[in-house]
Amino acid sequence: MHHGETQGGVRLEGLNKLFGERLVVNDVNLDIRPGEFFSLLGPSGCGKTTTLRMIGGFEMPDSGRILIDGRDVTNDQPEDRPLNTVFQNYALFPHLNVFDNVAFGLRFETPKSSEESVRERVGRALDLVALGSFAERKVPQLSGGEQQRVALARALVLEPRVLLLDEPLGALDAQLRARLQVDLATLQRRIGITFIYVTHDQHEAFTMSDRIGVMREGHLVQVGTPREIYETPATVDVAKFVGAANLIEASVVAPGFVDVGGVRFAAPEANNAGITTVMIRPERIHVGTGSTPATIGRVTFAGSTLRVTLSVGSATLVAEVPNDERSRALSDGQATTIEVLPDAVRVLVRS
């Protein structure tokens, strides 16, 4: 099932989609690399599913182009594109067993293939999703997670260059979701097909993706690796959406320095004087070291970590510290010091 390295690249150029007066996808430009696990991430209604449906050919853009491996597929029907889609509702045929569900698309698309080759390819696809012994099972006897894997096998058996996945784990419970996230990412890396995955769940996108495109109100606001999106969000919106963040109004007092609640912090990106928003991730605030005075408001137990609310000057910051011997000594109301390294203080663009 391995494809040539050059296959499965998807390019979106100036993609726009209107529903009535509303621009639901607004000038999206994106290059997805062959063999990449790429996620479109954003709150519901941000345009991510519509973008995916345009790539699949289920929606037509009002303007812009979609290229797969350099070929313009903008006006092609879904079945004429070298891709396959796995939807949230698996749409399996309840009256067919697992084998025939997976074989269905194969017999439909390549009616001339021999029963022997069908058997071999279906067997391979079921092995890929770890359902090798399930060929004879009936669909109603399967759990939600098993049905999802059958739907995946049915798409993979056709050996598409690109697989589109629309919130495929949305209906599953948290533990099963977490397990299938790992399975999916492992499978994708093994077979090397380009996966384009739509989710509103940042943890899911972070766990699986090589790169993520964050969408808001029809715009693609940032594209990057999970680490880039988390550590250097492009806008205040992205910072809020991805992980916990201290977002504080600050003023730039000198090149490379910001004032937060009357306390100075080094911030390499601070160069334009004036009011700005800075982001400090809670785990980047080190409590009990450094020389910046702070007062602990409240210490909250959170399993492997403790959340510590701090007053620093007139600002309130939340720190997250490992739950260890050192942090057990921290208590409500106590005076302490903190250290925040310069690269942890990010100056953000207002969005």
Image (cartoon, rainbow, N blue to C red):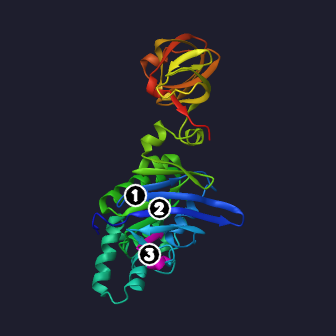
Circle 3 residues within 10 Å: few <14, some 14–19, many ≥20? many
Of callouts 2 and 1, which one flags the residue occurring earlier in the amino acid sequence? 2
Q: What residue type is labelled 1?
A: Leu
Q: List the residue tagged with mark 2.
A: 145
The disc label shown at residue 50, or none: none
Stretch in magenta: 78-85
Q: Is mark 1 on a helix, strand or loop?
A: helix
Q: List the residue tagged with mark 1.
A: 184
Of callouts 3 and 1, which one flags the residue occurring earlier in the amino acid sequence? 3
Name the residue nearer the viewer: 53 or 13: 13
Q: Is residue 210 magenta?
A: no
Name the residue nearer the viewer: 152 or 15: 15
Q: For the C terminus, which image quadrant?
A: top right
Check the image and report above or below for 108 versus 122: below
Q: For the N terminus, which image quadrant?
A: bottom left
User: In terms of image quadrants, where is residue 194?
Assistant: bottom left
Q: Which amino acid does label 3 sit on?
A: Arg
User: In terms of image quadrants, where is residue 126?
Assistant: bottom left
Q: List the residue tagged with mark 3.
A: 81
Q: What element carries label 2?
A: helix
Mark 3 touching mark 1, by CB under 8 A? no
User: Which label lies toward us, 2 or 1?
Assistant: 1
Circle 1 residues within 10 Å: few <14, some 14–19, many ≥20? some
Q: Where is residue 203 in the image (x, y as percent from the top left)?
A: 49, 46
Check the image and report above or below for 194 versus 99: above
User: Which label lies toward us, 3 or 1?
Assistant: 3
Q: Does the magenta stretch include residue 80?
A: yes
